[in-house]
Amino acid sequence: MALLPILRYPDPRLNKVAQPVQAVDARIKALIADMLETMYEASGIGLAATQIDVHERLVVIDTSEERNAPLVLINPEITWLSEERVKGDEGCLSVPGIYDGVERATAVKVTALDGEGQSRTLEAEGLLAICIQHELDHLKGKVFVEYLSPLKQGRIKTKMVKSLRDER
Ligand code: K1U
Ligand code: ZN
């Protein structure tokens, strides 16, 4: 297994649209293992393949307190979003240190393949529903800060570019 580098906003590769996974084969299974290791090491609750510069429809999630309930979604599609909405603070491993409010559906239904290539449907609410919407946005090339005002986006971009420069 390996830790994978996570792209940092405003890297334009975060805006690429992911393509469907063609086969759940040994390459995809190895990628899932690496993505889970990377997500746990970064203390995240989710990670989309886009964030590690792989533009295929694959996300890993674990919103459990115990960090022992990995969820793998391959070629996920949201089939239903609740009308009820909630605005809550989100973070992103690609935008470290930034938390801000985004309005999301409180519940979703999703279809996807699991890590063995089996077809699954899932109903989610609470943090899991929010995380699924956030991760599926990554697959569409959308980062959560792009829901914020142009003024906030500009400030966040400046802060991220500065902190990347300072790290180098
Ligand atoms: O996509 C990502 O970068 C992962 C992201 C997922 C996410 C967090 C919060 C709301 C929606 C989606 C994170 O894991 S951010 C980091 C984090 O540690 C965290 C933030 C809020 C709750 C729990 C964990
Ligand atoms: Zn994110």
Image (spheres, helix red, strand yellow):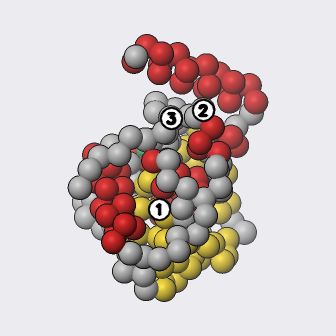
Q: CA distance from mark 2 to mark 1?
A: 20 Å
Residue position for label 1:
59
Residue position for label 2:
10
Closest to the observer: 30 or 66? 30
Q: Please give the name of the residue rendered at 40% of the width and 53% of the height, measured from the top-left corner.
A: 45
Q: What type is the residue that disc 2 sits on?
A: Pro
Closest to the observer: 43 or 119? 119
| Label 3: how many Cα within 10 Å (few below 14, some 14–19, many 20+) | some
Q: CA distance from mark 2 to mark 3?
A: 6 Å
Q: Quadrant of the N terminus?
A: bottom left
Residue, far bottom: 119
Residue, far right: 150
Q: Locate residue 19: give its quadrant.
A: bottom right
The spot of residue 95 in percent (x, y) is 51, 35
Q: What type is the residue that disc 1 sits on?
A: Val
The spot of residue 14 in percent (x, y) is 59, 44
2 or 1: tag closer to the N-terminus: 2
Position of 104 with respect to 49 (left or right) is: right
Mark 3 vs ligand 1: CB below 8 Å: no
1 or 3: tag closer to the N-terminus: 3
Mark 2 and mark 1 in contact? Answer it, CB < 8 Å: no
Residue position for label 3:
8
Q: Please give the name of the residue rendered at 60% of the width and 59% of the height, measured from the top-left corner.
A: 18
Q: Is residue 86 visible?
A: no
Q: Please give the name of the residue rendered at 55% of the width and 56% of the height, measured from the top-left corner.
A: 55
Closest to the observer: 62 or 16? 16
Element at label 2: loop
